[in-house]
Image (spheres, rainbow, N blue to C red):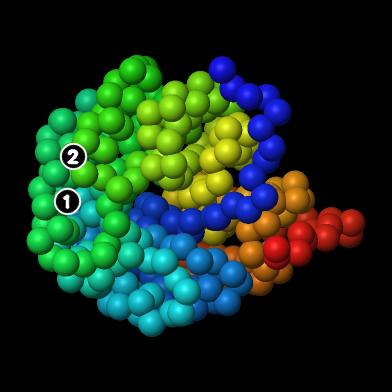
Amino acid sequence: MTDSKMPLPRHAVIREVGLRDGLQSIATVVPTERKCAWLRDAVAAGQTEIEVGSFVPPRLLPQMADTAQVLAYAKTLPGLFASVLVPNLRGAEQALEGEADLMILPLSASHAHSLANLRKTPDEVVAELGRIRAARDASGRKTLIEGGVGTAFGCTIQGPVEPSEVLRLMQALLDAGADRVSLADTVGYADPASVSRLFEQALRLAGERLFCGHFHDTRGLALANVHAALLLGIHRFDASLAGIGGCPHAPGASGNAATEDLAFMLAAMGIDTGLDIAALLALRERVAGWIAGEPTHGALWRAGLPKTFRAVATA
Ligand code: ZN
């Protein structure tokens, strides 16, 4: 049972995924220098964890072709924990080579989505994680491995995804050698009640190794879903500046939770994120200019911070 008296976390981390989840979903290819400027300014605004790109073949995602260079730049920024997405062992080898702090292997709990997007069954992805773990251990690198269980709340192709299957795959990833696991609502099918139920069960299974919640705002519930997970003690969330990311199955739909809106919500609730929201809004404006014509989302940038707003002091 959920302990309804569990206090909210005092600190939370917003892991920026705009440079990966966001940029891979839009047609505009942002040049490397601008990605590096984004990283630099994000770190200056207080962001400490950023997913900088994806080691996928450039012919599939030209937007991510410069991930090795962007990662190399990220490694020069003091205090930044740089992660990359890796679809397979080949990508993981590049992540190890670039000494990423963390590599995230996505697994789709929906078999249909998994076959369509990764051309592998979920269990084949689990086996790949085992090979990635062996490669990591053999390399002597410190790169951590996160198994990201996506379409955990439902899928545009398959429809329902059974929670028991999500949990089975999460356990299998841990057994195969994942250091951490996370849950993602890839297509905006979650609601606060389903988030509560699944994260509670996942926490029982993975404990502190359940590391992150990833919520898309496809149907406007991303922040409500974050709140539901916060109440269970989850304190790391993926988000994307300007909410970029979209959904390949719903043209024009919003993307990830918007970093700046989430930062505002957490700060307003007294949860320290270490983020300078004014600096994030300034960076948002710059990034929106670079991707002019692409849909951007979020609410805070329209209205600005309330006059009564006081950010919590960093403890
Ligand atoms: Zn996503």
Quarter of the picture containing the N terminus is: top right
Residue drawn at (29%, 21%) of the image: 165
Task: Judge left or right: residue 169 versus residue 267.
Answer: left
Q: Position of residue 149 (x, y in %)?
A: 33, 36
- The residue singled out by tag 1 in the image is 133
Task: Judge left or right: residue 108 versus residue 214.
Answer: left
- The residue singled out by tag 2 in the image is 176
Q: Residues within 10 Å of mark 1 (few under 14, many from 20)?
A: many
At mark 1, the secondary structure is helix
Residue drawn at (63%, 58%) of the image: 273
Q: Is mark 2 within 8 Å of ligand 1?
A: no
Residue 128 visible somewhere in the drawing: yes
Seen from the viewer's position, the closer of residues 39 and 77 is: 77
The reply to whether callout 1 and callout 2 are in contact (CB within 8 Å) is yes
**Splitting the image into four quadrants, where does ligand 1 fall?**
top left
Residue 260 visible somewhere in the drawing: no
Seen from the viewer's position, the closer of residues 209 and 190 is: 209
Quarter of the picture containing the C terminus is: bottom right
Query: In the rendered view, would you say 124 is above or below 90?
Result: above
Task: Judge left or right: residue 91 versus residue 104.
Answer: left
Give the total number of marks visible in the rendering. 2
Q: Disc 1 marks which amino acid?
A: Arg
Q: Position of residue 264 (x, y in %)?
A: 70, 54
Residue drawn at (29%, 57%) of the image: 144
CA distance for labels 1 and 2: 8 Å
Q: Disc 2 marks which amino acid?
A: Ala
Query: In the rendered view, would you say 155 is above or below 252?
Result: above
Query: Residue farthest to the right?
Result: 308
Q: Position of residue 310 (x, y in %)?
A: 83, 60
Seen from the viewer's position, the closer of residues 28 and 243 is: 243
Among the 4 quarters of the image, the one containing residue 277: bottom right
